[in-house]
Amino acid sequence: MDDAMRDACMPFDLDSNPFWDFSVRFYRQPGVAPACLRLQDSLGIDVNLLLFGAWSAAAGEAELDRATCAELLRGTAAWHEVVRAMRSARRRVKEGHRHLSQDEAGSAYRRVLAAELEIERYEQLIIMRAAGRRPPAAPHASSAAQRARRNMELYLDVARAAPGDDDRAALDVIAAAVTDDALPG
C-alpha cells in the first residue's frame, strides 16, 4: 500500500467509524432489523452494503453511482464470505447439541454471535475505506429517505437482485427510517 492509500484509509478505524455507529443505532429502529433480514434471506444480499446506502444518505453524501456500488461489491465479496460463514456457524450453534446443557449452548451461541458482529464491524471498516470520501449531496436535492432508497435500489440492481413486492416493502421500511437528522449532531 502506498503512502497516499494509507493516508486515505487512516481516518477510519474500528473505534472511529461513523458508519458502524449509525448502523448499530439504525438497526434498532422499528421494523429495520426484520426488513434487513428479509432482504438478506430472500435476495442473498449483503446487509452492510445496503446499510451503507442508508448511511450515505443520512450523512448527506452524494448518492452512490453504479461504479462505486460495483467496486464495493467486488471489494467486499471475499470478506463477506467470512461473514456468511460466521452467520452459518451462529445459526448452527443456536440449535445446540445433545451433549451440551442449555446454558452451555447459550454461552457458545453468545460467543459466536459476538465474533460474527466483530467480523461485520471489520466489513464495515473495509466498506468505509474502499468508498473513501465522497462529495456532499447538492443542497435540497432530495430527502435523506429518497436518497437512501435510490442508493439501496442501485445496490440491488448492481448485485443483480430481483426484489419482489415483499422485498420492495422491506426497502420502504428501511428508507422511511432514514431521516435528514439520523446522525448525531
Image (cartoon, rainbow, N blue to C red):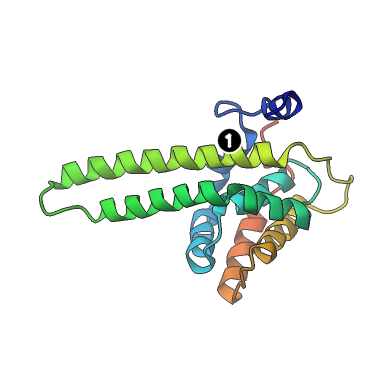
Q: Is 92 placed above or below 161 here?
A: above
Whether residue 28 is visible here, answered yes or no, is no
Picture residue at 72% right of the left edge, 61% below the top: 154
Q: Is 104 placed above or below 88 here?
A: above
* Left or right: where 180 falls relative to 38: right
Can you give x and y, in whole percent of width and height, for residue 118 in the image? 45, 37
Residue highlighted by disc 1: 21
Where, by quadrant of the figure, is residue 157 drawn? Answer: bottom right
| Element class at badge 1 | helix
* Left or right: where 6 falls relative to 116: right
Can you give x and y, in whole percent of width and height, for residue 168 in the image? 62, 69
Q: Quadrant of the C terminus?
A: top right
Can you give x and y, in whole percent of width and height, for residue 107 in the image? 24, 40
Can you give x and y, in whole percent of width and height, for residue 102 in the image? 16, 47
Picture residue at 56% right of the left edge, 52% below the top: 77
Q: Nearer the viewer, residue 58 or 40?
A: 40
Tell me which amino acid carries mark 1.
Asp
Q: Is 181 placed above or below 70 here?
A: above
Picture residue at 65% right of the left edge, 63% below the top: 156
Picture residue at 83% right of the left edge, 40% below the top: 136
Q: Quadrant of the N terminus?
A: top right
Q: Nearer the viewer, residue 14 or 170?
A: 14
Where, by quadrant of the figure, is residue 165 drawn? Answer: bottom right
* Left or right: where 115 falls relative to 169: left
Q: Quick one: label 1, few (<14), some, or many (20+) residues within 10 Å?
A: some
Q: Nearer the viewer, residue 125 or 77?
A: 77
Q: Residue furthest left?
A: 99
* Left or right: where 147 falls relative to 108: right
Q: Residue furthest front?
A: 2
